[in-house]
Amino acid sequence: MEKTIAIVDLGGQYCHLIWRQLRRLGVESEIYGPSTSSEFLAKHAGIILSGGPQSVYEKGAPKVSEDILRLNIPLLGICYGHQLLAQMLGADVRKGEGEFGPTKLSVVAQDTLFRGTPQEQIVWMSHTDSVTKLPSELLTLASTSQCRNAAFSDVRRHFYGVQFHPEVVHTENGLKILRTFVSSVCGLRASKDIKYRIKPLVDKIRARVGRKSVFFLVSGGVDSTVAFVLCAKALPKDRIWGLYVDTGLMRKDETEALRINLARLGLLDRLKTRDRSADFLENLRGVSNPETKRQMIGRLFVQVQSEVMHELGIDDRRWLLGQGTIYPDTIESGGARGLAAVIKTHHNRCPEILEMIRKGRVIEPLAEFYKDDVRELGKALGLEPKLTNRWPFPGPGLAIRCLCSRTTAKSSKINDALRKCVAALNYEGVLLPIKSVGVQGDARTYRKVVALRDGGDEIDYEKLQRLSTELCNVHTATNRVVVLISGRVKSLESATIKRATVTRPRVELLREADHIVRSKMEAHGLVESVWQFPVVLVPISFHGGESIILRPVNSTDGMTASFARLPKDVLRRIAGEIIELSGVDAVFLDVTSKPPATIEWE
């Protein structure tokens, strides 16, 4: 145990990413709750305090025993952990303007932690509170334009705090900083990346299943297909079934693509299919709240699964429900410990599924993995690149990309300070009368969207990145920014939101727009140039129709993301073809990072 790192989970969205990055370095670590005794933590080579969604000065915020300051072992605080450590050491922590997404960090002291990194570097921020004043024994290591104490140290006692997140891939030198902490500070040996092996996973599945069998919910996506194939590899064929439910909310030709993939894998004869599109659309009628949508869809999946098991004469006491859940599903749904904020409840984390998990009736072979891990596993299993490299698609399907509204409203002006900022770069900007889900400071936000229009009808990605970051950091009512690409729009101020719900015609319109995007990206050989490409239908009207939002992003694990810079000619061709669809008034491009926005809008 003396050769491990203790990670204290304070409720952060990225806590598990710390464990994952240390695993990449070949360093063992364990995740513990904040109530873990200091005596137990003392057995480790170092302690990392994770981020979290709360404020250290709030009543009931997660705390750790101050006894850890007297253990004589290294400490590293990240984001909330940075603020908590600073507060325990006598610093002031206060609410500030906040920083979200890519931020320029200036290293002011080349301390051990930043050894071998440049003086100016990009880090990933997600916070509203800041350490405003340090006691004299603590040294400021780095600053940003909005955060004076973005990193600090007590070199004598080996205490370090960083406001940014070194564990996310978008922090340029994040892995190097973690390597320095575990090796130079904690004295552990960091090695090269560890590759995943199939056999331990197969053995784990067999041990978990025992003499039971598995009834798998298969969506056709990467996660569920890889998990299904893993279970099929671990168990005899007669002890595994797959169920594919056609919800009516899938992409164009999705069902047939699934059948072809499973036929190539020799598993088509173990798949049951059910067309329940009418039921799903009927239950979604009139539902506009995104959380209600997600939970309702999860509930319907469980109902269909129970019905089909009954039809087949399957005794659920001898069968486990299999799911392709990956770690981001769990953390965005509130986390395994319940400390993290609920960003959005994934369909595989609805109350009914959670109750089955509590009773030990669910198996999730990929629950500790991220999307890039799953792709790696898929390749190792011999799955075709066309499947392993496909864009992620949410389990609830197009339902959560088909935004709804129960009211009508008009766009509104942004404040004077922001209008000057937007106008200085030759843009028009308004607040659209619609909200989207975001993640800011490790907490869920549900805020309005800023729409921009370039006065010169150009697409300048660097300007848009600057504007997006500034608008979301300063305008507290905003978590997402879009820019008009195509449409007969005289002024953005003419935008209105109309009443809309999930209906078959709206889903069909969205399905066609999504198909155009995929077809064009394939035709230009650009499918693998983006990590994911949600296409969103929003009831924002200019001439009685609706608007389509394009949301291409690049990521590694889905926990953080940046908007993808598509070739401008391809972007305009995509928008030009979508605008010809009947019922589409405008096409926008989402130019927001995660954070402050989530990848999906709902």
Image (cartoon, rainbow, N blue to C red):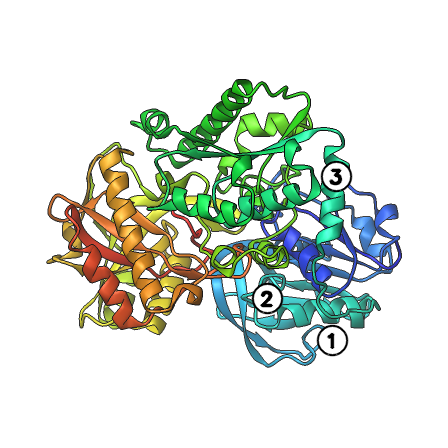
Of tags 2 and 1, which is closer to the observer?
A: 1
Q: Nearer the viewer, residue 479 or 195?
A: 195
Q: Earlier in the sequence, mark 2 or mark 1?
A: 1
Going 27% across and 36% down the picture, which residue do you hit? 405
Q: Is residue 485 visible?
A: no
Task: Decide if residue 541 is on the left or right side of residue 101.
Answer: left
Residue type at mark 1?
A: Thr
Q: Position of residue 484 (x, y in %)?
A: 23, 60
Task: Decide if residue 292 is on the left or right side of residue 371.
Answer: left
The numbered mark at residue 206 is 3
Q: Nearer the viewer, residue 596 or 87?
A: 596
Name the residue that disc number 1 marks: 112
Of tags 2 and 3, which is closer to the observer?
A: 3
Task: Report helix, strand or loop for mark 1.
Answer: helix
Name the residue that disc number 2 marks: 150
Q: Earlier in the sequence, mark 2 or mark 3?
A: 2
**Residue 257 position (above or below residue 406):** below
Q: Are marks 2 and 1 in contact (CB under 8 Å)?
A: no
Q: Is residue 494 visible?
A: yes
Q: Earlier in the sequence, mark 3 or mark 1?
A: 1
Task: Decide if residue 258 is on the left or right side of residue 330.
Answer: left
Q: Position of residue 422 (x, y in %)?
A: 27, 66
Q: How dense is the environment of label 1, judged by Cα within 10 Å: few (below 14), some, or many (20 and up)?
A: some
Task: Report helix, strand or loop for mark 2.
Answer: loop
Q: Position of residue 236 (x, y in %)?
A: 69, 37
Quadrant in the rendering for residue 196: bottom right
How far apart, in angstroms, are the residues tagged by discs 2 and 3? 47 Å
Q: Nearer the viewer, residue 168 or 255?
A: 255
Residue type at mark 2?
A: Ala
Residue type at mark 3?
A: Arg
